[in-house]
Image (tube, coloured by chain):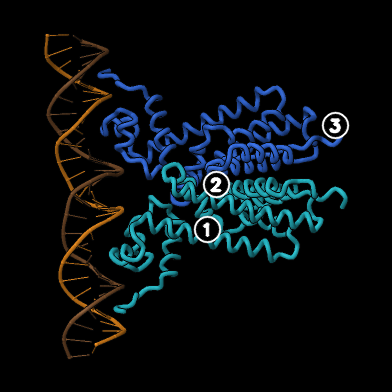
Chain colours: A cyan, B blue, C orange, D brown
Amino acid sequence: MARPRSFDEKQVLTAVRDQFWDAGYAATSLEDLMRVSGLGKGSLYAAFGDKRRLFLRVLRGYTDDSHGHLRRALAETPRALDALRALLEAPTGATTRRGCLMANSTCELGNADPDVLAHAHRTYETSTALIGDCVARAQREGDLPAGADPIETARALLAAQQGLLFMSRTGMDAAALSATARSLAAQLLPDPAGD
Amino acid sequence: MARPRSFDEKQVLTAVRDQFWDAGYAATSLEDLMRVSGLGKGSLYAAFGDKRRLFLRVLRGYTDDSHGHLRRALAETPRALDALRALLEAPTGATTRRGCLMANSTCELGNADPDVLAHAHRTYETSTALIGDCVARAQREGDLPAGADPIETARALLAAQQGLLFMSRTGMDAAALSATARSLAAQLLPDPAGD
DNA sequence: CGCGTAGTGGACCGAACGGTCAAGAATTCG
DNA sequence: CGAATTCTTGACCGTTCGGTCCACTACGCG
């Protein structure tokens, strides 16, 4: 052993993530990263590699966390239907002003960076699968019509959620956004016929 | 009068727009703009001002064009319902890989540039109004239930469209995307009860 | 045919960029 | 305590950034 690190890796990654989240990849300079992390250039490079590697690491951590939260929310909510409704109402929260780091990154870099695009593809496939499981559970619980394909429903829900997330970024009125979320939930999560 | 311009302004704006569209604002350098426009720095600055002013001009031109196309499509389609369906299927086209310039710009700059955010807000308000008119026409034509608020329906359709647009950027399978678009259309544009 | 004027293109600028590196500091172990 | 080793710091590098400027060019007009 020798001199130990003077920083907490998780704290640094969180600070760096927030910086990328607020400003995007290109608009974040190494100086920004030094400022928010409190580290010098050398330390940053020694610990995480160059800017792009650091960004990809942050992105992977972000999607892992997100899927963890999603998995837990979908599994722990007593009635699956409520979890699906909450999914659509998530973008109406106040936290949404800066959007979702993965969605922002897909928009900014998906065209130019195949790694980011591939990661985005995998991420949303996983989300679809998780939501699909929850749809199937809601069907078993009698809260959704049994006929529909759970994956197809999940895709529609995910698209609607991402659309709401985007609309919230346009500065759309919070009340209107909330109403639209409820309206979409009502139409995409209909009562089963024989209820 | 004196020496006339040696370039066509529209052509230059189109080339510049495509560059911003492909790469985003921050990732487009003045050298890129010179290359795609064929102009020198001096000419570019004399004709359009600095990079940001040029970008804002391109963005305004883009949204004006988009709304022109939208207005025409919504008005000229014989049955309004078909125009609304087409709206949801637009993101399934092959042109969509680079997304929508306005949406990309909102994601990239909405947090940091109040002018871009304000323009985004106005743009999507206008889109909502245009779609709302078309929804009202579809109701008059008996293709949609008369009860629903046209603006609320328009908001749901716009959100769904933007969500599909985003999903297409994640590299989602074209067939799945298309199926999701049809599924969303079926649920958000239901047959009127007494049909 | 020249004079005035607007347009052009590239040399040039300071600043900021991402990235490297060496010297020094802090720790463990012999 | 000293040697070995890792981490930290900031000076430094070449490049590229957005932006300015000016000598030159090409045209309309008298």
Q: Residues within 10 Å of mark 3 (few under 14, many from 20)?
A: few
Question: Residue B28 lies in what quarter of the image?
Answer: top left
Image mark 3: chain: B
Instruction: Name the mark nearer the viewer: 3 or 2.
Output: 3
Q: Which residue in the protein does label 2 denote?
A: A170
Helix, strand or loop status at disc 1: helix
Q: Which residue in the protein does label 3 denote?
A: B195
Residue at (77%, 40%) from the top-left corner? Answer: B148
- Callout 2 amino acid: Thr
Residue at (50%, 41%) from the top-left corner? Answer: B119
Question: Residue D10 lies in what quarter of the image?
Answer: bottom left
Residue A63's disc number? 1
Q: Position of residue B194 (x, y in %)?
A: 87, 34
Q: Quadrant of the C terminus of chain B?
A: top right
- Callout 1 amino acid: Thr
Query: For the residues marked 3 and 1, what is the alpha-carbon distance in whole angstroms?
Result: 46 Å
Q: Quadrant of the N terminus of chain B?
A: top left
Q: Is residue A85 visible?
A: no
Image mark 2: chain: A
- Callout 3 amino acid: Asp
Q: Nearer the viewer, residue B149 or B179?
A: B179
Helix, strand or loop status at disc 2: loop
Q: Residues within 10 Å of mark 2 (few under 14, many from 20)?
A: many
Q: Residues within 10 Å of mark 1 (few under 14, many from 20)?
A: some
Relative to residue A40, is residue B17 depicted above or below? above
Relative to residue B116, is residue C29 depicted above or below? below
Question: Residue A156 lies in what quarter of the image?
Answer: top right
Instruction: Name the mark nearer the viewer: 1 or 2.
Output: 1
